[in-house]
Image (spheres, rainbow, N blue to C red):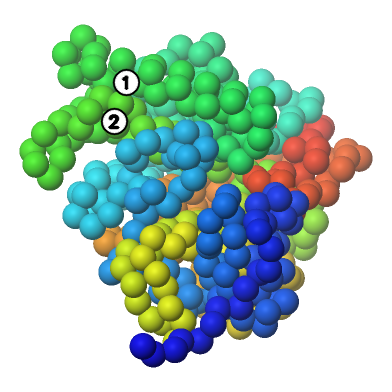
Amino acid sequence: MTDHQQLPQDKGLDHTLELLKEGYYFIMNRSNKFDSRIFETRLLGEKAICLVGEQEAKLFYDNEKFQRKKAAPSRIQKTLFGKGGVQGLDDQEHRHRKAMFMTLMTDDKLEEIRRLTREEWRNQISDEKHEVNVYEAAKQVLTRMALRWTGIPFKKEEAEQWGEEFSDMFEHAADIGPKHWKARWSRQRAEGWLEDLVQQVRKEKVEVDQDRALYQFSLHKDPKGKLLKPYIVAVELLNLLRPIVATAVYIDFAVLAMHDYPTEVAQIRGDNGRQFIQEVRRFYPFFPFTAARVKQDFIWNDYEFKKGTLTLLDLYGTNHDPVIWDQPNQFKPERFNDWKSNPFDFIPQGGGEFDIGHRCAGEWITIDILNETVNFFSKEISFDFPDQDFGYSMNDIPTLPQSNIIITNIQTTH
């Protein structure tokens, strides 16, 4: 039997508590300690391999070596992803389900995302000109926009409640105690609501636009030609709605960047907004890492990977890797002027290929929402930042500025 190189090991029985304490820095701290882009630790009672870096991301997204089935912890499935969703599928089943999402990423549908985002921000600000909590306002804007875009009927007074439930799923997914149980209850309510709606669509008891996700997902068939179960359709609709509302986190950081880096705002007004929002996505924390399991035994760089081993890829760490990024801890939108990206170096929402891999199908939606929002805040309104706590903790997942960013004295500029 051939001996292989021993993985650097994080000594101790379990490091789940350290993960909760160190948050986004957990993998980077140990990578630096071991001077290695790969190491072994123990989380939730089992061995886990941690990876950081471009080549490591390329390995992680090799569908022959890793699978997503049973990778996410149960508590995350019951809050963030839902059971049976596209994130936990592999091979043909994943490709077929992913194609359902990718049919929504046409030029016309993305243009509608941009139009609806503009409309909803204008509506929101026209109602709240004295003082705005940017994060809370963004959640309301994005909830209304997402419901309209997916074709889900709703009354205006219902939107705020649904926005709170969508946001519970990502705000409290990793919490312990009452907040976590609240997130589970919110998912159950939303899934039940959507499952009932899917059944009404199939029975033609409710009239919906056939060009919308609600109709298309409700009538989508699996590789065997059978309609998806109604609760699976509900899960996948939430896999559109929840991430759109979660973009509020990026919006809050984008407005923070406008405060912290005012010289860059002039560049936004000069139509360089795309570079600005890409740097927001790289620089600020969003998802800390993503998970998979080893599909079959293999050897990589003389390290042995055993079938079934939990493996984590550090998204935040890869986006701050000094091998990839010059001065990674500096906010420099100009780095994206001539950036030649590949699927494994810039991975704020995961990496890999869009069509055959596990890269987030909604990444284009996120970029368009952010672009329209930053344009609105920089070109259509003026405002002040009152005294507040702009700090954020890297130990909270997800994290936000302590004040959620408050703006006052809001005026339309045209």
Residue holding disc 1: 195
Residue at 51% across, 13% down: 158
Snapshot quadrant of residue 160 = top right
Q: Residue furthest bottom?
A: 2
Task: State whether residue 210 is above or below residue 396.
Answer: above
Could you say where residue 293 lies in the image, as x and y percent from the top left?
A: 40, 60
Q: Earlier in the sequence, mark 2 or mark 1?
A: 1
Q: Residues within 10 Å of mark 1 (few under 14, many from 20)?
A: many
SS of the residue at dot 1?
Answer: helix
Q: Nearer the viewer, residue 296 or 96?
A: 296
Could you say where residue 23 lies in the image, as x and y percent from the top left?
A: 69, 54
Q: How many marks?
A: 2
Q: Residue furthest right?
A: 387
Q: Residues within 10 Å of mark 2 (few under 14, many from 20)?
A: many
Q: Residue furthest left?
A: 225
Q: Nearer the viewer, residue 314 or 148?
A: 314
Point out the image quarter for the C terminus: top right
Snapshot quadrant of residue 394 = bottom right
Left or right of 377: which side holds 386?
right
Residue at 54% across, 33% down: 169
Residue at 29% across, 30% down: 233
Q: CA distance from mark 2 to mark 1?
A: 7 Å
Could you say where residue 105 lies in the image, as x and y percent from the top left?
A: 32, 48
Q: Nearer the viewer, residue 323 or 59?
A: 59
Q: Which mark is residue 233?
A: 2
Q: Nearer the viewer, residue 162 or 256?
A: 162
